[in-house]
Every structure is written in C-alpha cells, then in structure tokens.
Image (spheres, rainbow, N blue to C red):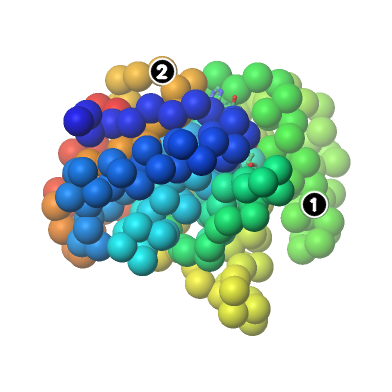
Amino acid sequence: MEDVIVVPGGEASKNDLQLFHWLVNAVDQHGIDRHSYIVAIGGGSVLDLVGYVAAVSHRGVKLIRIPTTVLSQNDSGVGVKNGINYHGKKNFLGTFAPPAAVFNDAHFLTTLDERDWRSGMVEAVKVALIKDAAFFSWMEEKAALLTEAEPASMNYLIHRCAELHMQHIGGADPSKAALPARWISATGAHINWNNSPTSNCATAKPFPSASRWTAYTPGSPACWTPKAWNASYNC
Ligand SMILES: NC(=O)c1ccc[n+]([C@@H]2O[C@H](COP(=O)([O-])OP(=O)(O)OC[C@H]3O[C@@H](n4cnc5c(N)ncnc54)[C@H](O)[C@@H]3O)[C@@H](O)[C@H]2O)c1
C-alpha cells in the first residue's frame, strides 16, 4: 500500500463513508499506532475527515495538519474539531481533538480560486467582529488590497485571525479548552511538496518518534518540526 493517500477535496470528502473506512483501514494496514503521526494536507474538509479518522483510530492517533485554504489556515486548521457528515447531517460524527502541530504555508493559497479566498476572509470578519475591533478596522482599511489577495495583507489577516481563534478556543469551555501543542505560522516556501497543492492528500506514513522537536526556520518566524522529519518529504 502506498504511504500517501489522495482523497477528493471539498465537502464531498466528508460525505463519503467509504472514504472514512478506507482511511481507517489504511491506519490499520500501515501499522499506525499512537506513537505515530498522521499528516493531513488539504482544505478544511479534508482536515476534518482525516482528523476524525485519526481521532477514532486507536482512540486517538496524533495528527499534524497542513491547511491549504484561507479558511483552514485562519480557522479550522488551528482549531480542535474534526468531523464528517452523516445521514445528510453536517458534522454529525466528530470529536474534539487538538492537533500535535499545524503548518501554515502561504504558498498553498496561490492556487485557490476567488471563492475560496473570500470564504476564508469572511471567517476573519466574523472573528474580528467578535474579538478585535482594531483588527476589524484594519480590514476595512485594507479592503481593496484584501480583495486582490495582496500577499502581505493576506498573511497578516490569516495570522491575526488564527491567533484570535486560538485565544478563543483556549477559553473556559472544556470542549474547546485544548490548544494545539504547537502552531506554526510559516509564510515562506519551505516545504517542498512535489505534487500540486491542488491535490489534497493525507499521509499515513509513520514518523519516527517526534517527542523531541527542533526549530526549523526558513522564512518562518516560528516554525517547528520533528527532528526526524525530512522537510522535503515528498507528498
Ligand atoms: N473543524 C473545524 O473547526 C471547522 C471550522 C470551520 C469549517 N470547517 C469545515 O471546513 C470545510 C470547508 O473548508 P474549506 O473552506 O477549507 O474548503 P474545502 O476544504 O471544502 O475546499 C474547497 C475547495 O478548494 C480546493 N482546495 C483546497 N486547497 C486548495 C489549494 N491550495 N488550491 C486550490 N484548491 C484548493 C478543494 O479541493 C475544494 O475543491 C467545511 O466542511 C466546514 O464544515 C471545520
């Protein structure tokens, strides 16, 4: 069986129980256990699906998320929830399970269509309205640049929104209290995935023990990766 499993992107990935079973079987067949890591690369839908697979396999396999959409980088990828749709009901099956690490890489966003840029920004508007008036004012000032997906403004929008999101889920609600162990904001090109970022893939490759982490800095203010992980690992 291959180490990298490619699944359809978008909401379809959360509607198909066969996909869920396929990935759970892959966890079994690869001998993935709770010392291993599953890496999910994709938009919020794929992260939700793979996160659910990881959470229910062996009662919780560690998960690394690599979000590839604006929404997943500024919201769902840095959150604690996962889930799939069931009997036509959105997110009917799911758990709360913080990831072991999240890698945000702005290069993924360059291939998004306009709709996905905008839907991700809408999340930032919501968060700003609830949490940070200054951030909302900043968005108003930068509206024209954000509409054009100007990189520096988008990077700040994603970073600030993710930060506020994490602060929120670190609050008093027990179901939202757990934070990701490490959140990585990486805006440079430093993970050389060979496939097109438009492909969504979830690896079921067991990593060596990642209990010790080492700084990994190219283009990134705060980037951490397991010592044994080759950052050029080809997806
Ligand atoms: N778990 C949470 O806390 C949480 C929070 C909010 C939303 N969600 C879920 O997130 C999902 C929506 O996620 P989304 O908005 O990220 O979209 P998505 O994952 O549904 O992806 C939208 C489309 O973009 C494509 N795509 C993904 N990355 C791309 C890239 N880099 N370049 C080009 N195309 C790319 C996908 O293949 C798909 O066609 C919903 O199912 C929603 O329920 C989860």
Q: Amino acid at mark 1?
A: Lys
Q: Position of residue 202 (x, y in %)?
A: 37, 37
- SS at mark 1 in the image: helix
List the residue tagged with mark 1. Answer: 126
Q: Is residue 180 above or below residue 22?
A: below
Residue name at image x 38 percent, y 27 percent: 6
Depicted 216 relative to depicted 151: above or below: below
**Of the residues tagged 2 and 1, which is closer to the observer?**
2
Residue 12 % position (x, y): 59, 31
Please tell me which residue lies in front, 121 or 149: 121
The residue lying at 64 percent from left, 52 percent from top is: 91
Q: Residue drawn at (77%, 63%), measured in percent from left and top?
A: 131
Q: Position of residue 176 (x, y in %)?
A: 60, 71
Name the image quarter holding the N terminus: top left
Residue 197 image-quadrant placement: top left
Q: Which residue is mark 2?
A: 196
Q: Tell me the amino acid under the disc marked 2.
A: Ser
Q: Secondary structure at mark 2?
A: loop
- Dot 2 alpha-carbon crowd within 10 angstroms: few under 14, some 14 to 19, many 20 or more: few
In front here: 144 or 30?
30
Q: With 9 as the anchor, is 173 left or right in this view? A: right
**Residue occupying image coordinates x 36% and y 41%:** 23
Residue 55: which numbered mark, if any?
A: none
Is residue 114 left or right of 100 when viewed as pictured?
right
Count residues near mark 1 (Cα–Cα under 10 Å), then give few for <14, some for 14-19, many for 20+. few
Q: Quadrant of ligand 1?
A: top right
Q: Is residue 183 visible in the rendered structure shown here?
A: yes
Q: Nearer the viewer, residue 217 or 92?
A: 92
